[in-house]
Image: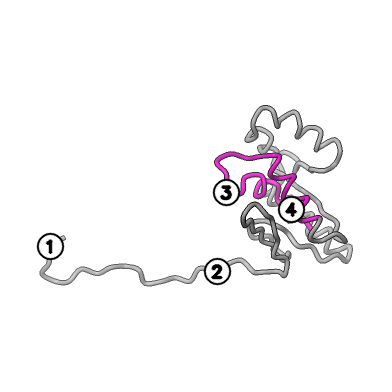
Amino acid sequence: MIVDADLLAGWRRPSASLAQLREAVAALEQQEPDATVAVIADPALKWALDPSDQVDIENDIVTRFLLMAPAGSEGGHVGFISQVVAVASAAGWDPVVVTARSIPGARLGRPHRVDGTWSFDLDGPQPTIMAAGSSVRRRRKGHAA
């Protein structure tokens, strides 16, 4: 399991929360006790947090709860997650990435939170593909706009 920390820390909130990220990861680990979970974040997450969380995030990095994508990673932290997926796949693992972004070569997991309880759909839903529609409204002849 690879978790996009930015998604869960900011899930339906006006600002990111380290407590929410920890809560969501704990729920994922409880749901999938045999899975190995890697939590990867964009380095900018630290500065999106409340100042009180900025000290705690350093501890999460040191204790290896959280891995920051290296600054300057090609494609940003999503590109780094793609590289982790490639390495995990080459090692024979079948990674599922909990994210709202498209990650080449990975099954996607989706988080849900109902009444404060986290759950995760990990069966590999595919990203939604939008088809071109015909939402253009045409004016009738002889009518002014």
Q: Front-most of 39 and 11? A: 11
Q: How was this image coloured?
A: one colour
What residue sits 65% from the left and 34% below the top? 49
Q: Nearer the viewer, mark 2 or mark 3?
A: 3
Distance from label 2 to label 3 (Cα)?
A: 23 Å
Give the mark nearer the N terminus: 1 vs 2: 2
Q: Front-most of 88 and 124? A: 124
Mark 2 element type: loop
Q: Nearer the viewer, mark 4 or mark 3?
A: 3
Q: Position of residue 33 (x, y in %)?
A: 85, 59
Q: Quadrant of residue 67?
A: top right
**What amino acid is found at the position of numbered circle 4 in the picture?**
Val
Q: Which class describes the residues within 10 Å of circle 2: few (<14), some (14-19), or many (20+)?
A: few
Q: Is residue 54 left or right of residue 11?
A: right
Q: Is residue 82 left or right of residue 49?
A: right
The question of residue 24 being in magenta is answered with: yes
Q: Which residue is mark 4?
A: 3
Distance from label 1 to label 2 (Cα)?
A: 37 Å
- The span picked out in magenta is 1-29
Mark 4 and mark 3 residues within 8 Å of each other at the beta carbon: no
**What amino acid is found at the position of numbered circle 1 in the picture?**
Ala
Q: Quadrant of residue 47?
A: top right
Give the mark nearer the N terminus: 4 vs 3: 4
Task: Name the mark on residue 12.
Answer: 3
Q: Which residue is mark 2?
A: 129
Mark 4 element type: strand
Distance from label 4 to label 3 (Cα)?
A: 16 Å
Q: Which residue is mark 1?
A: 144
Mark 4 and mark 1 residues within 8 Å of each other at the beta carbon: no
Q: Position of residue 44 (x, y in %)?
A: 66, 37
Distance from label 4 to label 2 (Cα)?
A: 22 Å
